[in-house]
Amino acid sequence: MSGAKMEPGACQACPGSCPFRRELEAPAFSRLVRDVVPRRFDAHSPILFEGEPAHSTRCVRSGHVKEMRSGRRGEDVILRILGPGAALGLGEVLSGDLYATTVETLGPVEACTIPAQTVREAVEESPRFGLALLKMLAVELREAQDERLRRTEDSVWRRTARALLRLSSASSEVVLPIRRIELA
């Protein structure tokens, strides 16, 4: 079932790559966990919708998602493929903007929903956490700039090979229900 709730203790088992688990001090993390809603999503389920208010961020526990944005002609353009540890919609939650992208699952996904207000309170309470999120967003910006450069300089074949290498380094098996044209 898409969006089905998971067991309440799921946050304690969150991967170490999740910034909320890794960077928040124990008391602040305990308060954050009270508001977190762990969920399971079926394959091809939307998690966030471009243009909607950023009411929460989603931290991916397991599985992979594709982040897309509508192109000028109305087509969905895949911006990136993300896996465990990704914090979806975080920039929009912190800035109070609308979601800039749509995020859809590629296969079954477990993700924790963290309300925007809870994230903002955690940042106010913990400067260390706020700095960690700032660093994470700075890395995302640099990666987006690098990707923009590669898309203008590299061939479709090279971009496809790079995407497959990136995905295979995260997993021993790469099974993607997406077309080559979407990868490049």
Image (cartoon, rainbow, N blue to C red):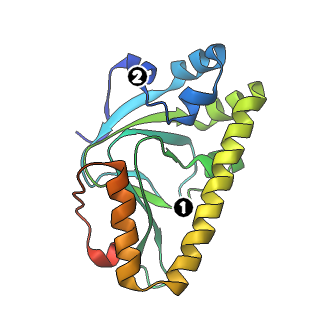
- The residue lying toward the viewer, choosing from 44 and 65, is 65
Drawn side of residue 3 relative to residue 119, left or right: left
Which of the 4 image quadrants contains residue 112? top left
Drawn side of residue 26 relative to residue 63, left or right: right
Question: Residue drawn at (50%, 61%), measured in percent from left and top?
Answer: 101
> Residue 98 in the image: x percent, y percent?
60, 56
**Res 75 seen here:** no
> Residue 160 in the image: x percent, y percent?
35, 74
Question: Residue drawn at (44%, 19%), measured in percent from left and top?
Answer: 12
On the image, numbered disc 2 is attached to which residue? 13
On the image, numbered disc 1 is attached to which residue? 51
Observer-side mark, 1 or 2, equals: 2
Q: Is residue 113 above or below residue 50?
A: above
Question: Residue drawn at (53%, 42%), measured in percent from left and top?
Answer: 57
Quadrant where the C terminus is found in the figure: bottom left
**Amino acid type, label 1:** Gly
* Label 1 – label 2 distance at C-alpha: 32 Å
